[in-house]
Amino acid sequence: MTDIILLDGSIGQELVKRSGDRATPLWSTRVMIDHPDLVGEVHGDYFRRGATVATTNTYAVHRSRLMRVGMEDQMPALIDTALTQAERARAETGGRIAGALGPLLASYRPDLNPDPADAADKFAELVAMMDSRVDLFLIETVSSVQEAEGALRGTTGCGKPVWLALSVQDDDGNLLRSGEPLTDVAPLVEEFSPDAVLINCSRPEAIPAALEILPDMNRPYGAYANGFTYISDGFLEDAPTVDALEQRHDLGPSAYADQVMRWVDQGATIVGGCCEIGPDHIEELANRLRAVGYNIV
């Protein structure tokens, strides 16, 4: 049977939940300051449940975000903490580490239009800080063609595999959150040659339509969805907190695995979970994949 790469699930949202602290605009970055060992515990939990990739808690570690709270000088230390905790978990179980590169300014905000040249410099700085300690880079929640260009430029020549994860509209998987057709990313995929193209942080119901498009980009492909009811207006404001988003209650481990197995039937070879998809979901998915003969790598 086909080899399947099984990603972990939610990192940031899981950390905020487990910490029990009040949500802040720093999101899971705050957890690394107050409860650093919790990060390693979450990674370890996912590995033990069947995931083969740990996604570093660096999604929101950007100078632009840290500057808002006067913590820009702490960026290297925060990245080191995130990497150290992922390495700690991997030492106990094995697996790979994916260096997470989230949006520079905010999630689901293609209207902010980061300049690709400036974005490339900022991503390149992050890549240089993580390159020697990760197995691959995972560019996450890309909501527009322009965002994709900046991130792909910033990872060019890093010497590690680069996976590009795009976020599509919740009611139409043919469109990026910017409203641009998903097919418009194809020229960038051709130019920068990422090693995989994925769909992430979108409703699972939107993903099948997107997976009809990705095979034409001639890269390994897959998806990992979120478990939000919808992206609220409150979360699209400046410096939002995650309590502006609501978890679905109809997407337990079995229901989520049902969705993912359909993606695998569509040819997805890299799957996992995003926000609100936790260790129980990943364990159920690992069990399902093994039960029908897939080899999790």
Image (cartoon, rainbow, N blue to C red):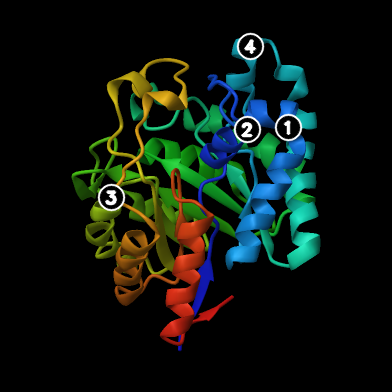
The type of residue carrying mark 3 is Asp
Tell which circle, 3 or 1, labels the residue nearer the N-terminal end.
Answer: 1
Could you tell me if the residues under marks 2 and 1 are in contact, i.e. CB atoms within 8 Å?
yes
The earlier-in-sequence mark between 2 and 1 is 2
Could you tell me which secondary element the residue under label 1 belongs to? loop
Residue 272 in view in this figure: yes
* Label 3 element class: loop
Q: Amino acid at mark 4?
A: Val
Which residue is tagged 3? 250
The residue beneath circle 2 is 19
Q: Earlier in the sequence, mark 4 or mark 2?
A: 2
Q: CA distance from mark 3 to mark 2?
A: 24 Å
- Kindly tell me whether residue 114 is visible in this rendering: no
Mark linked to residue 35: 1
Q: CA distance from mark 3 to mark 1?
A: 31 Å
Along the viewing direction, whichever of 249 and 208 lies nearer the viewer: 249
Q: Residue furthest left?
A: 171
